[in-house]
Image: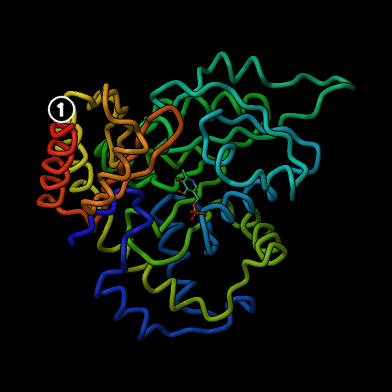
């Protein structure tokens, strides 16, 4: 049976070119800072994002954690969205390991947090308050329909943060989906922030790895935190080699995922029993709700799985489907046909 896995873009397998590059990579001990392929990936990443320096890490979660540990001390407060990945899905590492206090503010459906809300949440100096140190933004915003934040919004938040002496960290796990969706150079989205992390292992199809970018002295401090949390990886140039191919060959291709997502969203919209607003889902991540008199979300999930379609069921009967390189235009059409037949035979 053909499997169409829409659970996440982390399901992407490395390309042939990545496999070859991994096999051939020249490597050294990265804890000694002697891996030439990692240096190449880090330099390339910093240059692409318009930052002085970069650091290769095993995962997006560790890259965010190391970023926060480098920006904040114990007892500092950060402002972030209530639908942010850092708050929802990173095991509370910022508090457990960093003693950092998360102050969440409601994300709107387009991923933004109103500027007034951010400004209102910045603490003034008072014996009773933790000091506000950092604002975290996520671009694209996974749990806000994969929405891209615009350069104008990034500019205004950074301007506000800097006015109050705060720093800005961007969880850019899918920052290239944002730049491709907005048809702009990724630097337009990253130039303002003090630090940015992005993932190589999602839509870009590399098997492992994320990169944290920022000022050179800040990255040197981040290197120490990476070592402390166990992210020093020795001959990881074999992994970085795939990351280089990802940056060279996979960024523009993300547009195909966005197109397939749009096709799927528009097809789903026409099915009775499914609620989705295609306009609200502008990149590769779709959220839709099952609203069928006879099929429960759990049954729908099971029927789909029995026909080879894998989805994520979230809370409240909401499903997530993430388009990625392993899901072609033809797969998208078959997924639609299978969904239709499951809903119609009930
Ligand atoms: C927005 C966002 N940030 C961070 C991460 C964490 O990345 P990783 O799974 O590599 O730890 C994810 C993973 O899905 C994500 O969607």
> Does mark 1 have its CB less than 8 Å from ligand 1?
no
Image coordinates of residue 170 in percent, x first then y, are: 51, 41
Q: Which of these two is toward me, 301 or 203?
A: 301
Can you say whether 156 is above or below 213 in the image?
A: above
Q: Is residue 238 left or right of residue 94?
A: left
Q: Is residue 190 left or right of residue 71?
A: left
Q: Residue at x 44, y 73 (%)?
A: 239
Question: In the displayed image of the protein, which residue is found farthest to the right?
Answer: 127
Instruction: Pick the quarter of the image with the N terminus.
Output: bottom left
Q: Name the secondary structure under disc 1.
A: loop
Q: Which of these two is toward me, 230 or 244?
A: 230
Asked which quadrant contains residue 299, the reply is top left
Q: Is residue 329 left or right of residue 38?
A: left
Asked which quadrant contains residue 48, the reply is bottom left
Asked which quadrant contains residue 342, the reply is top left
Q: Is residue 147 visible?
A: no
Image coordinates of residue 75 in percent, x first then y, are: 80, 37
- Residue neighbourhood size for the residue with mark 1, other residues' Cα within 10 Å, grouped as few (<14), some (14–19), many (≥20): some
Q: Is residue 319 visible?
A: yes
Can you say whether 303 is above or below 82 in the image?
A: below
Q: Is residue 120 left or right of residue 326?
A: right
Q: Residue at x 18, y 60 (%)?
A: 2
Count of residue discs = 1
Query: Where does label 1 land, which residue?
Result: 271
Image coordinates of residue 263 in percent, x first then y, are: 14, 37
Image coordinates of residue 255 in percent, x first then y, are: 21, 46
Instruction: Pick the quarter of the image with the C terminus.
Output: top left
Can you say whether 174 is above or below 155 in the image?
A: below
Q: Residue at x 29, y 23 (%)?
A: 291
């Amino acid at each position: 049976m053909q499997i169409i896995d829409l659970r996440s873009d982390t399901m992407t397998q490395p390309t042939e070119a990545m496999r070859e590059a991994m096999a051939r990579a020249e490597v050294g001990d990265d804890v000694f800072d002697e891996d030439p392929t990692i240096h190449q990936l880090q330099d390339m990443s910093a240059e692409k994002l318009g930052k002085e320096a970069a650091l290769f890490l095993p995962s997006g979660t560790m890259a965010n954690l190391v970023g926060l540990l480098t920006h904040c001390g114990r007892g500092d407060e950060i402002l972030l969205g209530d639908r942010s990945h850092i708050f929802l899905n990173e095991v509370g590492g910022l508090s457990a390991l960093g003693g950092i206090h998360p102050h969440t503010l409601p994300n709107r459906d387009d991923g933004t947090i109103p500027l007034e809300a951010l400004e209102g949440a910045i603490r003034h100096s008072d014996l009773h308050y933790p000091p506000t140190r950092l604002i975290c933004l996520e671009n694209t915003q996974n749990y806000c329909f994969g929405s891209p934040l615009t350069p104008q919004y990034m500019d205004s938040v950074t301007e506000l943060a800097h006015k109050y002496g705060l720093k800005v960290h961007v969880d850019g796990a899918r920052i290239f989906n944002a730049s491709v969706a907005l048809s702009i150079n990724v630097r337009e989205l990253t130039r303002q922030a003090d630090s940015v992390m992005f993932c190589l292992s999602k839509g870009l199809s590399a098997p492992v790895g994320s990169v944290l970018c920022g000022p050179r002295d800040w990255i040197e401090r981040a290197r120490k935190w990476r070592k402390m949390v166990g992210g020093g990886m020795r001959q990881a140039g074999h992994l970085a080699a795939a990351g280089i191919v990802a940056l060279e060959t996979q960024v523009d291709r993300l547009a195909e995922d966005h197109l397939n997502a749009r096709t799927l969203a528009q097809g789903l919209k026409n099915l009775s029993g499914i609620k989705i607003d295609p306009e609200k889902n502008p990149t590769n991540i779709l959220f839709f709700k099952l609203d069928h008199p006879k099929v429960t979300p759990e049954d729908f999930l099971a029927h789909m799985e029995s026909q080879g379609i894998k989805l994520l069921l979230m809370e409240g009967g909401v499903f997530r489907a993430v388009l990625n390189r392993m899901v072609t235009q033809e797969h998208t059409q078959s997924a639609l046909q299978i969904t239709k037949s499951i809903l119609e035979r009930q």
